[in-house]
Amino acid sequence: MIPDTTTDDNDTNNNYKTTKVLLCGGGNAIHVLTSYIGAPLKHCQVSILSLFPGEAQRLRDAIPPESGIACINDLTDEPVVGRPTLITDDPAEAAAAAEAPVDVVILALPSFTHETYLRALQPYLQPGVILGAMPGEGGFDLCARFVLGDDFCNQSHLFALETLPWACRIVEYGKTVEVLGTKKEIDVVISSSPEKENTSSDDAVVVLALLQQLVGPLPKLMPASNFLAVTLMNINSVWHPTISYAFYQNRDVTIPLDEPPLFYQGASEYTGELLSQISDEVLALGRVLQERYPGLDLSSLHHVRDWMLRSYGNDISDTTNIYTMLLTNKGYRGLTHPMRAVPDETDATKTKYLPNFQYRYFSEDIPCGLVVTRGIAALANVPTPYMDQVIFWCQNCMGKEYLTADGRLAGRDLHETRCPQRYGIFDLETFMVKNRYVDAVAASSST
């Protein structure tokens, strides 16, 4: 059931109906959400579930008891401070905080952990829950249906944000987090329920309004056309692996660096060109799908250049091309490549740095991002040579195999991905109908 967050006219204390929000994770985004939801939205009761060993206790110990987590941000003069009412590693306790079922579940953690959290929560969630991911890396709906079942998902509201609402980083764990830049607007998809055909549209509007309250006034959440559009518009899956590949491809990654290199501001013109070429491949896939299914709405699928302008607007000082936008976006200022510290072999008092190819830019954005798009392209027979180039290089750095040497999605680690082939889907029509991107009638008329 969608929670009622309005006041009761007969309530003389003008108390809000409490919406129980469960945040899953313990990283940057969870810190921001806890500050925002736990402070100004008095009608929300915030709980945190972390299944990472020891993290729940660590977070409980770190949060100042007299205040909460302070979020320094670009929208308010003073930090926003909020705190959770519960931090736990017990899914049963988390899903029934205050002896009542949770209303909203937000997975704000790497997408390769989504299945683990969904399986842990599955026995305790009630149909009708609002359940989604920030961001909803490619194939979140496929994963949710695989774990929770079609019946449960059809009675509930799945949602996914195309990207995180902010660029953010923890300053001091459990105490302070900083929002480096708040995006201006982003897309969010909210599933409709075929079992409530007359009310699903109104319900989606209410869910959208609630999610907007949770993230704050900005970014403005714009309704995306459907889950397929959000999967294809997975900006992280294009951004992170491609920028990494362009930076390291001609470097010896075994030679330590003196300091972590800048990620966005270290990009080259070639980086911008390759980002554009991969985005062109994604748009070509979208066109093929719309030609095959004329009623398919992919209007929220954009080129990465347009996404940048839409998301960051005046925060970008030079909009000449993708390369200049990466360099001059204030939301990206100072962010570095993910690295791991290693000893300096010539000076024991110094530290050097090697690339961290196990970071989420690889472990998340390849199997739950670029490989998902590549899998859909394979179903639609759309060639993706630039995308393949990046996947091959990244999987080699990760020590994984998703694409085989002959370009098939049949590698030994395919089970770690969220591509359709991982779920046993090998033809386009089954993929489109099973996941309710089109109905069976539209699919049969397209053949």
Image: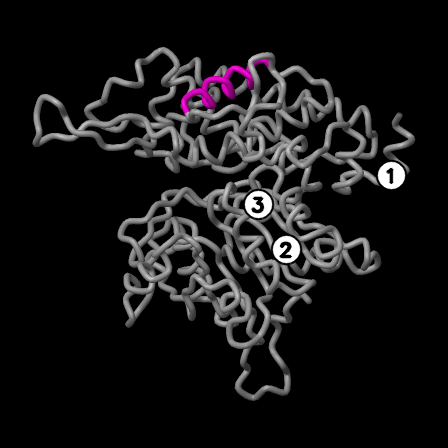
Q: Is residue 157 magenta?
A: no
Residue 58, by quadrant, is bottom left
Say which residue label 1 marks. Answer: 440
Query: Which comes sooner in the sequence, label 3 or label 2?
Result: 3
Query: Which comes sooner in the sequence, label 2 or label 1?
Result: 2
Can residue 5 be seen by looking at this rendering? yes
Residue 300's spot in the image, x, y percent?
66, 36
- In front of the other: 434 or 277: 434
The N terminus lies in which quarter of the figure?
A: bottom right
Q: How is the image coloured?
A: one colour
Residue 262's spot in the image, x, y percent?
31, 27
Q: Which mark is residue 208?
A: 2
**Label 3 is placed on what type of residue?**
Leu
**Label 2 is placed on what type of residue?**
Leu
Q: Is residue 403 left or right of residue 269?
A: right
Say which residue label 3 marks. Answer: 161
Whole-angstrom CA distance, mark 3 to mark 2, is 11 Å
Whole-angstrom CA distance, mark 2 to mark 1, is 28 Å
Q: Which mark's residue is nearer the viewer, 3 or 2?
A: 3
Q: Is residue 109 left or right of residue 18?
A: left
Q: Which mark's residue is nearer the viewer, 1 or 3?
A: 1
**Considering the numbered disc 3 on the image, is that residue within a helix, a strand or a loop?**
strand
- The residue located at (36%, 43%) in the rendering is 180
**Label 1 is placed on what type of residue?**
Ala
Residue 27's spot in the image, x, y percent?
39, 50
Q: Which residues are magenta?
A: 385-397
Q: Main secondary structure of the magenta part?
A: helix
